[in-house]
Image: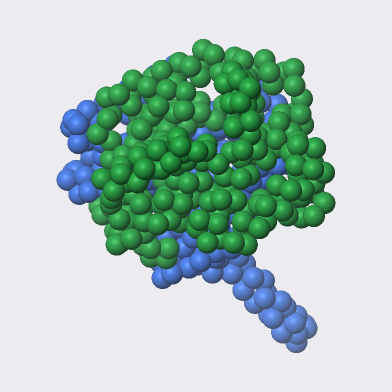
Chain colours: A blue, B green
């Protein structure tokens, strides 16, 4: 009896080890490259939007919530907000910084509510990645088959302390999202105050939620 | 010919006045390291200067209204009547008309391979492609269009800074450099001389058709940009600036 159990263990051990090894290499993001991260997120979003366009009326709220879950897993909101506020970030208290990150995320979320309706089966081509230390760039192209258009989209990622790659900027046809917000924030801050900027963001969010 | 000469002189003088080199700009590196500035530091494309903001904002408002009240409803109706394939053909036609501009500017920037591709495309599409409505150069001969070049980019290639931002009625976003570039480019399009010879109304009609056709293919994009922006004017200005600098670097 005993010896048969021993044999079973002997046979099973390598199999178990293999499974554990495979599992750990899949789950740990440390071994996944930036391009895999963006690929996975793109696949999830495409799947979600393919479901959505079948029944846009009833699925809007649900789709948007799921989209934001994917976004939270892939975007480093704090890094984005920090870069968008640039030199003014350091002047804020940590409470103000926290509030600003939340407002910034809402601003982006708001921008994408309208975008999901313009989805028409776009294809994404991955052209490659460049890694330099803790920073990476993933190059893609979004293709709209019906119109035959190609839009180059670049993702910028940063390797976090827990060694996961997170997106901190999206560059569409050379236009960086973070730079675009930075230019707006800087111009507003130079003309008025931080509280005025926060008020304008809140007003905009309130106004858009009414529509 | 005399008019072209006068415009070129004006260009040379204004460019001389607004000389600002980007060649020594540290933010112009192509390495991704240039984007690795710590949060709190500025990075990427430097902002465009905007001394005429008051006027630009007024024209921006005018263009905004022009879009929502006239261009968009017309383009929508046009899009319903004219099928997508036909509209893409019209787009091909206009792209082909402007081929001489791209050929010239590729050559100015010493991109001779691109210039020859543009030239072959122009020849093939004007003849086999029936005045440029079709694109046999791409579909049959696999001559894919290279990046589009214009005189604003040529000036940028020779380290000419953008000068300052301009938002003009009807034309929209441009800069001192790119506005002058557009004027020079206009002189390179041969069909304009042909049309002027008959009547300037033809040019206006062609321009309107081009704008309506283009808008019908891009409905909703401006709305999205506006929705994402905290201040649409600033967002459009910066997007224009970043996009142009990107095209020049390519």
In-front residue for pair A165/B159: B159
Residue sitting at x 41%, y 52%: B156
Q: How many marks?
A: 0
Q: Classify residue A162 as left or right of residue B16.
A: right
Q: Classify residue B118 as left or right of residue B184.
A: right
Quadrant of the drawing holding the N terminus of chain A: bottom right
Q: Quadrant of residue B196?
A: top right
Q: Classify residue B30 as left or right of residue B112.
A: left
Is residue B6 visible in the rendered structure shown here?
yes
In-front residue for pair A133/B223: B223
Q: Position of residue A85 (x, y in %)?
A: 28, 44
Q: Position of residue A192 (x, y in %)?
A: 18, 30
Residue sitting at x 43%, y 63%: B30
Q: Position of residue A209 (x, y in %)?
A: 44, 21
In this view, B1 is above or below B117: above
- Residue projecting furthest to the bottom: A3
Is residue A180 visible in the rendered structure shown here?
no
Residue sitting at x 69%, y 21%: B79
Q: Quadrant of residue B141?
A: bottom right
Residue sitting at x 77%, y 31%: B85
- Residue projecting furthest to the top: B69
Q: Position of residue A97 (x, y in %)?
A: 26, 43
In-front residue for pair A54/A114: A114
In this view, A204 is above or below B249: above
Q: Quadrant of residue A204?
A: top left
In this view, B49 is above or below B154: above
């Amino acid at each position: 009896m005993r010896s048969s159990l021993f044999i079973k263990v002997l046979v099973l051990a390598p199999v178990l080890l293999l499974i554990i090894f495979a599992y750990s290499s899949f789950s740990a993001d440390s071994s996944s490259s930036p391009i895999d991260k963006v690929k996975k997120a793109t696949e999830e979003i495409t799947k979600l939007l393919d479901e959505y366009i079948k029944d846009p009326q009833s699925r809007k709220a649900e789709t948007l919530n799921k989209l934001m879950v994917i976004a939270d897993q892939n975007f480093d909101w704090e890094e984005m907000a920090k870069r968008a506020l640039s030199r003014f970030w350091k002047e804020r208290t940590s409470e103000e910084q926290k509030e600003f990150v939340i407002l910034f995320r809402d601003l982006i979320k708001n921008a994408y509510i309208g975008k999901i309706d313009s989805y028409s089966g776009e294809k994404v081509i991955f052209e490659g990645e460049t890694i330099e230390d803790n920073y990476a760039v993933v190059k893609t192209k979004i293709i709209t088959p019906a119109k035959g258009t190609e839009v180059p989209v670049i993702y910028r990622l940063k390797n976090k302390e827990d060694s996961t790659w997170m997106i901190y900027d999206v560059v569409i046809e050379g236009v960086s999202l973070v730079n675009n917000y930075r230019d707006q924030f800087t111009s507003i801050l130079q003309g008025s105050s931080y509280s005025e900027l926060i008020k304008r963001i809140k007003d905009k969010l309130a106004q858009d939620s009414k529509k | 010919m005399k008019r072209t000469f006068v415009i070129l002189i004006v260009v040379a003088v204004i460019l001389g006045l607004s000389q600002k080199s980007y060649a020594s700009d540290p933010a112009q590196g192509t390495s991704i390291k240039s984007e690795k500035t710590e949060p709190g530091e500025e990075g990427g494309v430097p902002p465009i200067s905007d001394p005429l903001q008051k006027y630009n904002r007024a024209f921006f408002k005018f263009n905004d209204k022009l879009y929502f009240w006239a261009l968009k409803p017309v383009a929508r109706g046009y899009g319903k009547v004219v099928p997508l394939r036909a509209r893409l053909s019209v787009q091909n036609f206009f792209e082909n008309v402007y081929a001489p501009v791209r050929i010239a500017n590729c050559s100015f920037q010493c991109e001779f391979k691109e210039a020859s591709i543009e030239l072959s495309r122009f020849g093939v599409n004007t003849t086999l492609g029936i005045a440029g409505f079709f694109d046999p150069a791409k579909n049959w001969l696999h001559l894919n269009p290279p990046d589009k070049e214009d005189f604003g980019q040529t000036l940028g290639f020779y380290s000419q800074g953008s000068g300052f931002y301009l938002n003009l009625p009807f034309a929209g976003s441009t800069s001192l450099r790119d506005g002058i570039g557009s004027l020079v480019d206009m002189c390179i399009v041969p069909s304009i001389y042909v049309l002027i010879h008959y009547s300037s109304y033809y040019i206006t009609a062609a321009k309107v058709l081009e704008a309506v056709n283009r808008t019908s293919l891009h409905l909703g994009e401006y709305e999205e940009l506006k929705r994402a922006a905290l201040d649409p004017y600033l967002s459009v200005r910066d997007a224009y600036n970043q996009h142009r600098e990107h095209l020049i670097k390519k």
